[in-house]
Amino acid sequence: MNKEFPILNKNIIYFDNAATTLKPKSVINAINDYYENYSANSHRGDYNIAFKVDDEIDLARETIKNFINARRKEEIIFTSGATESLNMIVFGFFENILKDDDEVILSKSEHASNILPWYILSLKKKIKLKFIPLNEENKITIPNLLKTITNKTKVISLAHITNVIGDIRNIDEIIKIAHSNNIYTVVDASQSVPHIKTNVKEMDTDFLVFSGHKMCGPTGIGVLYGKYELLLRMMPFKFGGGMNESFNEEKLVLENIPYRFEAGTQNISGIIGLRHAVEYLNNIGLDEINRHETYLRNYLIRRLKEIPYVKIYNEFSESSIVLINVDDILSGELGLYLNSKNICVRSGVHCAKMLKEESHFENTVRISLYFYNTYEEIDELINALKNKNELYNFLK
Ligand SMILES: Cc1ncc(COP(=O)(O)O)c(C=O)c1O
């Protein structure tokens, strides 16, 4: 792996994969290749390197369509990331269709990007945000979802895997329940698309979003998936070049889907890099990735349990995210101690600032694994945590 991920040669142990993942050489090479060999703009040139850019974007769209099993490639819209995708869905689609007193169902363990756009919409329109109560493991349950749905519910917007608790939601069942009640669904797949096989056709969600950088791709590129018939009813969120077919003082005619949602010069190197990231993951296989991560997670939990002063907060979550603290040590300080051992983790509330209202804990150290992590790296983490003298000396 070290050969394929250049940053791993820098002698670091990287356990912050829920924040962003490392980039393999094939992705870095593809980005460099664009800048070195054909760095033209898209849709605008009449020359070979510009044609190549259009072909590359087309190929990327097709590759991502197949990766998540969308029906058509027009359903794949390139955005700057999950955050932009969610904002586009909330303000481009739901702002136009939600009416007074309509209800939107979320949970308090959502990332800020899946709460704040809805919150801002609730300030602009008379809609109500409702949160599914979490159980004692900080998970949502189907009975609690059913209790939250009313005849005013119009949207359920949830992460497939949450970025703090790391629980994997029964998203197929949730979507079935939603649709049988005429409720739209939005799936924040930022933490799931990189780790488990995603099939939007089977899942049948109306919208789904994810970011490239959490799946070995570049930063600043992400995807908004929407069912074609819904995208026909969505308004662009940005206006400018590339998204219009014609305009004059009286009239704007929008470009076809997906281009009407991709105003301005695109993140071309990001799109190309994302295609190579998807191919990289496909070559390993999502099932294989998931299998390895499950082994690693189980091993990590087993080893953490050897240390009496380590508290694990989400032992019964299913993904490769593990939350811990050490007895009377602030999570930020524990993070800095691990950094002194070249171990990268994240401490804090991890962008889910409403979670503390239900979870009864606030700041934690998050260890989030990906397929390139190893048992040996986990052993090093455990050794660092077991070294209580050094840990307390570091804090003095
Ligand atoms: C569950 C979840 N949703 C949304 C986001 C936002 O992703 P981005 O910052 O790439 O837009 C993140 C990032 O941490 C996330 O974990």
Image (cartoon, rainbow, N blue to C red):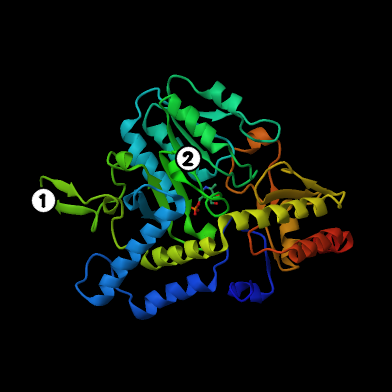
Q: Which residue is at the front of the view, 304 or 351?
A: 304
Residue most toward the top?
151
**Residue identified by numbered label 1:** 248
- Image position, residue 97 (x, y; %): 32, 31
Q: Of helix, strand and loop, which one carries label 1?
A: loop
Label 1, label 2: how many angstroms apart (C-alpha)? 41 Å
The earlier-in-sequence mark between 1 and 2 is 2
Q: Which residue is at the front of the view, 140 or 359?
A: 140
**Residue identified by numbered label 2:** 203
Rate crowding at label 2 as few (under 14), some (14 to 19) or many (20 or more) other CA atoms within 10 Å: some
Q: Is residue 130 left or right of residue 337?
A: left
Where the C terminus falls, by quadrant?
bottom right
- The answer to whether residue 263 of the structure is visible from this angle is yes
| Residue at screen point 51% across, 47% down | 189
Q: Of helix, strand and loop, which one carries label 2?
A: helix
- The answer to whether residue 216 of the structure is visible from this angle is no
Where the N terminus falls, by quadrant?
bottom right
- Image position, residue 229 (x, y; %): 30, 39
